[in-house]
Image (spheres, rainbow, N blue to C red):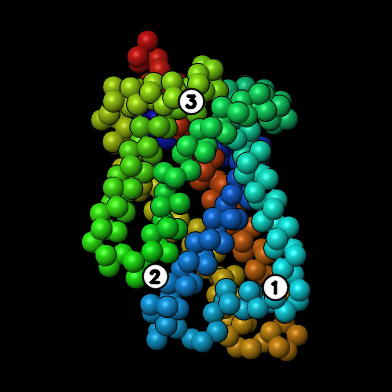
Amino acid sequence: MILSLLRESKDYIKNNNKFIKLVFYISFWKLLYTLVLISYNINNLLIYRFDKWLPRMSTLKYFLEEIISNHLVWLVILIAFIILIWYVFLYPTGMSAIIHFLKDKKNSIWKAIWKGVTDFFVMFELNALAFSFWFYTYAITVLRLFTLWILDNTIAIILVSVWWLAALFSSIFWQYAKFLIVIENMWVFEAIKKSISITITNIWVTIRWRVMQLVTYILFYFKAFIIASAPMLLVYFLINAWLADRGFKWVIRLVGVITVILIIYMISIIQAFFRKFWFKMYNKVVKIEE
């Protein structure tokens, strides 16, 4: 069953660029925010714990200095404000809109977004509840704690391990909640309870899928890294060869922006694929239960 659903989801993504664009538009600011946070924390990790293996000039440090020297802090504050407003008000609507788009055979983006507005409050509640259990949140926090030498503490390790188990549980057992909210008009805790019940009933299928999803993620991100490595290495070379002081700043900025957009677009493709798969998975397990 899983392999057939994977093939169907792959064919859908290949033949429906409109859906990829919808996911890209909805996820752009979240992915940008996540990329910046992860890059910042990895940069600090390398500087404070592995600085003897690094050149003195880091790519992220260069861009931070560029922002400060060109008085662009106001622009960063504006972008941060946009991300905050988008995350609080628009992202919950967008999550619902994706499901409405998949449910609507006419595939109307604006119609799906308009329907998503009606689910704002309940999707906002689910989003706020799930935020602490996202693996992105977990990974960023663990990186920060490791950089600050806090994870050398036994109590901290135990707490982080418990948090990881909670994040793992929610990522497995809460997957159907958003579909139950949008499609069956359930409230948050009712949807979570039903999602856990559905997952337990189909536990072996879920475990097989999770393993396959992990393998797919690793392969995709490896390919994405290979594709994005060329512009990333170009930026790194231009900065560390001090070519920025010879009139190449505009090249660095252009390549940097293109690289970020390229990475976000590639991540949007894999997110679109998995959202389509979970939608088909939801329809399949609901029919089995009926």
Query: Label 3 is placed on what type of residue?
Result: Val
Q: Residue 96 falls in which quadrant of the image?
A: top right
* Residue named by callout 1: 67
Query: Label 1 is placed on what type of residue?
Result: Ile
Name, please, the residue furthest toward the left. Answer: 154
Q: CA distance from mark 2 to mark 3?
A: 36 Å
* Residue named by callout 2: 148
The tally of labels here is: 3
Query: Label 2 is placed on what type of residue?
Result: Leu
Is residue 81 in sight in this rendering?
Answer: yes
Residue 114 position in % (x across, y down) = 71, 27
Give the mark, 3 or 1, whose residue is nearer the N terminus. Answer: 1
Which of discs 2 and 1 lies nearer the camera? The answer is 2
Nearer to the camera, 64 or 104? 64
Q: Residue at x 60, y 88 (%)?
A: 241
Q: Residue 238 falls in which quadrant of the image?
A: bottom right
On screen, residue 102 above or below 139:
above
* Residue named by callout 3: 188
Is residue 112 in sight in this rendering?
Answer: no
> At numbered mark 1, what does the secondary structure look like: helix, strand or loop?
helix
> At numbered mark 2, what does the secondary structure look like: helix, strand or loop?
loop
On screen, residue 115 above or below 222:
above
Q: CA distance from mark 2 to mark 1?
A: 26 Å
Nearer to the camera, 64 or 128? 128
Give neighbour class at mark 3: few <14, some 14-19, many 20+ (Cα, 10 Å).
many
Residue 248 position in % (x across, y down) = 72, 82
Position of 273 with respect to 115 (left or right) is left
Give the mark, 2 or 1, whose residue is nearer the N terminus. Answer: 1
Give neighbour class at mark 2: few <14, some 14-19, many 20+ (Cα, 10 Å).
some
> At numbered mark 3, what does the secondary structure look like: helix, strand or loop?
helix
Q: Residue at x 54, y 17 (%)?
A: 185
